[in-house]
Image (cartoon, rainbow, N blue to C red):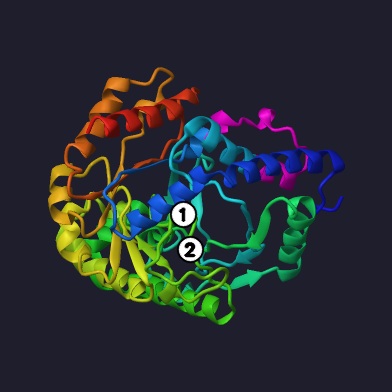
Amino acid sequence: MDKYCISVKDRGILRQLAGKVAEYAAHPREDRKRTLWTLHNDLKTSEPVVFIDPEGGWREIFPPESLTCEGEIARQWEEELRRRIYHIENLKDDFVVDSIFSIPYVYEEDGWGLDIIHEGVRTGGAYHVKPAIEDYEEDFEKLHFPNLIVDYMASDRLLALAQETFGDILHVERYMMWWWSLGMTRWFIDLRGLENFLCDFIAEPEWFHRMMDFFCTGALKRIDELEKKNLLFSNTENHYVGSGGFGFTEELPLIRGTANAKDIWGFVESQETSTVSHDMYGEFIFPYHKRILERFGMNCFGCCEPFEGRWKYAKQLPRLRRISCSPWSDRALAADLLRDKYIISHKLSPTPLATFEMNEAEVRRNLRAVLDHAQGTIPELIMKDNHTLGKNPMNAVRWVELAREEIANT
């Protein structure tokens, strides 16, 4: 059976959902949210922006048996459309629902030259990295930069299928997010293992630098390749950037389709090194982060790692705009350091949402810890990293309601 095919039944379901998305996208409310994100990203408003991504919780909002399409691709598109509708009808956060339906490229890449082995639960659970690099002298020469292999024929068929299915209702276009982060330490750990990686700061400092230089050079070569082949896409509109937030801005060129890195958002983080000293970050990680971000027009920094101790280094990153303030950060110090010169991307703790009966008092305390120091800053309230909603999707809905209430009481 042809994989790139939509049955008559599935087509009808998708068109009905696409029609509802198009209806919501045309509402003036979405223009207001788009304007809010733009002013927010351009540091022209202090109004908090609220966004929740249920992440693993989507499996509880839309369990497999709740989807009505039968084909594999149709089910993927059905869930994407249902998520947008859920943001409007249930979550009511500042996620912008637009009429664009993005189709990625079909591609493969052959990795860094050694097999990555994750032992344990692979889907949404914990795992252990079995080191592929056990001896630097023997194994480093086996590494190579990843080769990107785009299946243009399959990619065009997928794009045409979406256009044929609901292209008269939604604007179907190509968009590809080739990476989430260019922080590089995750790549290092996948090949070396977390324990070895952390020990190498002390035991193998020269090899540590050599590995980071290798990953950095590989990342820059990939950027060059994507630019040369017109495969790097603009992310300055309704595109997820950094570790929470969207790319709307008037400070970068408005480009639909492919772009150069200098015209888009970049992002680095190193949450895996949250246990190393700030100066170790400055010596072993920061120089390579800086080399990467020099290529981009505007930049985001950080995820779950507290940033305050690293700020003396991070503030040297070029064209820095969005900084992640994790649940482990000092909110008051973050406000003093960043004020209205940067976006403070506050990550609220997902822990209260992970039980069936959400502890609303704890949620309010977390929100107040942010909002009590929000005056004079550019804050965004982000709820993510939800591996579960405690089998109660209303936790996500209620979190947004509580956020709105606490903002109103500020």
Q: Is residue 7 left or right of residue 214?
A: right
> Looking at the picture, does residue 7 appear above or below residue 193?
above
Depth check, front residue: 32 or 88: 32
Could you say where residue 362 lies in the image, as x and y percent from the top left?
Answer: 27, 24
State the residue at coordinates (43%, 69%).
264
Q: Amino acid at mark 2?
A: Asn
Task: Report crowding for label 1: few under 14, some 14 to 19, many 20 or more residues within 10 A (C-alpha).
Answer: some
What span is colored magenta in the figure? 58-78
Circle 2: element type: loop
Alpha carbon distance from label 2 to label 1: 8 Å
Quadrant of the snapshot with the C terminus: top left
> Looking at the picture, does residue 16 appear above or below residue 352?
below
Quick check: can you spot residue 245? no
Could you say where residue 178 lies in the image, as x and y percent from the top left?
Answer: 53, 64
Q: Are marks 2 and 1 in contact (CB under 8 Å)?
A: yes
State the residue at coordinates (49%, 74%).
222
State the residue at coordinates (13%, 48%).
333
Q: Which residue is mark 2?
A: 235
Q: Which residue is mark 1?
A: 240
